Amino acid sequence: MQRPYPVPPQRPVGRVVRPKAARRTPFKITPTLLIMGMGAIGFLTLMSFLAVAFGFMLVLGSGNILPTVTVGNLALGGMTESAAAAAINETWQHITVRDGDRTWRVPADMLGITVNAQATAQRAMRYGRGEGSALLGIIGMAKVAPVLSIDPSRAAEGMALVAEMVNIAPRNATIRMEGNALVAVPAAAGRALETGGTLSRLANAATEFIDGALDVVMRDVPPNVTDAAPLLAQAGALLATPLSLNIYNPVTNQGLTWQIPPSEWGRWLTTENTPQGVVFGVESAPLSAYLNGQNATLGGGQSIKVADAVSALQKALSQSRTDAQTRAYNAPTQYTVQHGDTLGSIAWNVGVQMFRIQRANPSVNLEALRVGQVITIPSKDDLLPLPVVPNKRIVVSIARQRMWVYENGQVKWEWATSTGISSSPTQPGVYQVQSHDGTAYASNWNLYMPSFLSIYEAVPGFFNGIHGFPSRGGAQVLWENALGRPVTYGCILLSSANARALYEWAEDGVVVEIQR
């Protein structure tokens, strides 16, 4: 019978014999080897110790300051004593004042501190050589206190300067504009120097300056305003009205008002922390730009001083008002000479004294004027050097020999008066009460003039004014029956009773308008 698949060849039956592996002899630490190893380790350890000891002895015997020695933040390691003294003297001319992460460098003598550089260097040199740890001086961290002396009176004075640097003012709760909305800004406490505590630390300089800084003692300062809600209400009330600037021209006695709508000035609204609390204001730059644009619309040679107007509006807002006053100023003008003009007639017509016109035209012969010639008339504001009192005005008419006294736009008094005679006339123009001179003396005419208000310079250094009936020689009273006609030498005459009332009513700066 045939097999269906080939029969694999048969292996001989029997045991396979493999060669035996070679046997290893185990390593044994004998007493001899152990003694030799321990001897080697000990030898190496001894050599290392001797090397370190030798190194220590070299460092200690080098004559230099040990490597890790510092005075404050000044590293002196490896320096000679003289080099260390020089470095200490230079570095410690200023000291570090510290409040946590905040630091300042201030002159040492400002706080009455004097460093003894030589003694400090000697102390550093002794560290590890009889004082302190030699180990720390070589491989650790060795801090040596400086040798300082303190002048207590200078230190106390210097603390006031330190306070200016380190104090942080508290921030009151306030508001600010975000987009078109007012939002509250929370309050924040401030910090203030505790002078007594800081001086106590300074007095203990050996310990205090071990790390090179004077750590000031501070106290918290609470804000005055902690709730912004009332400010939001107050700002809302302010922003319900325009910001108004009332402009008054004292020369023309005319006024006008510029109004900035809330939609515009509200975007400029600011607040400021003051010791009294939060006050309102506006950003100066956009307000100044607005006023400069408006200035061009005044015309007639008029303008305002924008800086003055900004200050006036800022002051008004700080008082929770939205209106302020400012003054219009007048530019010099040009005058064309007409037929028959003289320097005197021009001065009379324009209301400016002859000597002022001469000053404004130094290169012009004003004694030989020509028809058509153009001369400069100085600004009439030159005659109003004092701040103007806006609600009072005195008007004098030469033609009518009358005086009207106005307060808040209403006639308070109307009096008969007398002005200068033709040979010494009263000069028309717009002036101010310059001073209250009591009883003035006019040596040219030997006159004593009671209740004298200086008004304008007739010639340089000589003032005409308003006064009561004068006397000569202390007895003779003049012009008591002359009111209503020109009798004076340029001054404006009132009865003595009226002159006294005016003297007490009209403060310096009140405008006096003398009409032809």
Image (tube, rainbow, N blue to C red):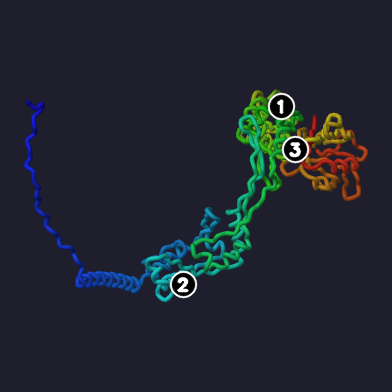
Asked if residue 380 shows in the view, the reply is: no
Which amino acid type is marked by label 1? Asp
> Is 107 above or below relative to 61?
above
Which of the labelled discs sits on residue 388, or is there none?
Answer: 3
Residue at label 2? Answer: 119
Q: Quadrant of the N terminus?
A: top left
> Upstream in the sequence, badge 1 or badge 3?
1
Query: In terms of image quadrants, where is residue 325?
Result: top right
State the residue in front, 448 or 179.
179
Marks 2 and 3, how far apart at CA: 69 Å
Give the side of residue 62 with respect to residue 337, left or right: left
Which residue sits at x=50%, y=60%? 94
Mark 1 or 2: the one toward you: 2
Determine the secondary structure under disc 3. loop
Give the side of residue 66 with respect to residue 354, left or right: left
Q: Residues within 10 Å of mark 2 (few under 14, many from 20)?
A: some
Which residue sits at x=21%, y=68%? 29
Marks 1 and 3, how far apart at CA: 33 Å
Residue at label 1? Answer: 341
Mark 2 or 3: the one toward you: 2
Q: Residues within 10 Å of mark 3 (few under 14, many from 20)?
A: many
Which amino acid type is marked by label 3? Val
State the residue in front, 487 or 192.
192
Which residue sits at x=83%, y=33%? 408
Please provide percent x and percent y for residue 431.
76, 36
Mark 1 or 3: the one toward you: 3
Q: Quadrant of the C terminus?
A: top right
Q: In the image as oriented, which residue stretches furthest toward the right?
A: 481
Give the side of residue 166 with respect to residue 323, left or right: left
Asked if residue 281 shows in the view, the reply is: yes
Please provide percent x and percent y for residue 375.
65, 29
> Upstream in the sequence, badge 1 or badge 2?
2
